Image (cartoon, grey):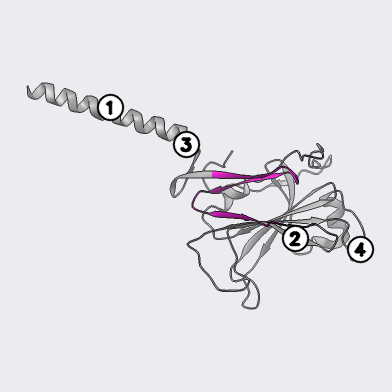
Amino acid sequence: MKTFIVIILIALLVLATGMIYLVKRSEPQIHHQLGYVKWLTYQNNEYGFTIKYPFTYSPTALAEPILTNLGRRRFLDIVDPMDISFYVLHVIPARVAIIKQPMSYRGQVYRSLEDYTKAGFAQGSSGIVSVNGFNALHFHHHASSMQEDAPYEQYMFIRNDLIYQLDLKTDDPFRDEILHSFRLIETSSSKNPCPPAPEGERPRDFPFLGGESPR
């Protein structure tokens, strides 16, 4: 009788383990140093970009992110609801902004990061890096008592007449996963891909530091 009970308990344990495994396989999860995390995706087909974020974060897309030649326009904020701050320039986990060219103070359209760099906009950058096969100009911004309350990383991509700017909080635990989930995709009005690196210039690859990147 005891043997029969033990067999039943083992069978139930095996069944429960199998069910847990199947449930986990069906969920969009990414192995992170903090454990398994469920990820969600924001995609904008009009301007052609997609980005992932952990389900505990909250994305806010601006209702009317009007693009003009006046410069940078915030497009998407990804915030951590648990990170509350009344600081005016509080640094959030991620922000996507878009600049419509030409820039008003120069009247030029830069079709590549190389041209953008030659025009003098790369001062203070660490150079061109590779993010998911796309070229990006990388900047590291330090925290300042008069400006942002935390350091952040900034990545700038160029496609056609648009400059995409991705800001990521440096010490956010999901920074690298969010970075490596960002992609430029086909827009609803154009199918031109992001320009590749020119022949002979191979951008250094930005290291991924936090487990498997979200795909």
Mark 2: few, some, or many residues within 10 Å (few <14, many ≥20)? many
Does residue 79 appear left or right of residue 99 in this picture? left
Secondary structure beneath dot 4 equals loop
Which callout, 2 or 1, points at the residue further toward the start of the chain?
Answer: 1
**Circle 4 or circle 2, nearest the eye:** 2
Looking at the picture, which amino acid does disc 3 mark?
A: Glu
Does residue 74 appear left or right of residue 197 in this picture? left
Q: Which residue is mark 1?
A: 14
Q: Which mark is residue 106?
A: 4
Which callout, 3 or 2, points at the residue further toward the start of the chain?
Answer: 3
In this rendering, does residue 28 appear at all? yes
Mark 2 and mark 1 residues within 8 Å of each other at the beta carbon: no
Compared with 67, 89 (above or below) is below
In this rendering, does residue 209 appear at all? no
Tell me the residue at 65%/78% (across/down): 146
Q: Which residue is mark 3?
A: 27
Mark 1: few, some, or many residues within 10 Å (few <14, many ≥20)? few
Q: Which residue is mark 2?
A: 73
Looking at the picture, which amino acid does disc 4 mark?
A: Arg
Looking at the picture, which amino acid does disc 2 mark?
A: Arg
Residue 181 in which image quadrant: top right
Question: Furthest residue to the front?
Answer: 63
Q: Which residues are magenta?
A: 40-66
Give percent across and percent down for residue 78: 59, 56
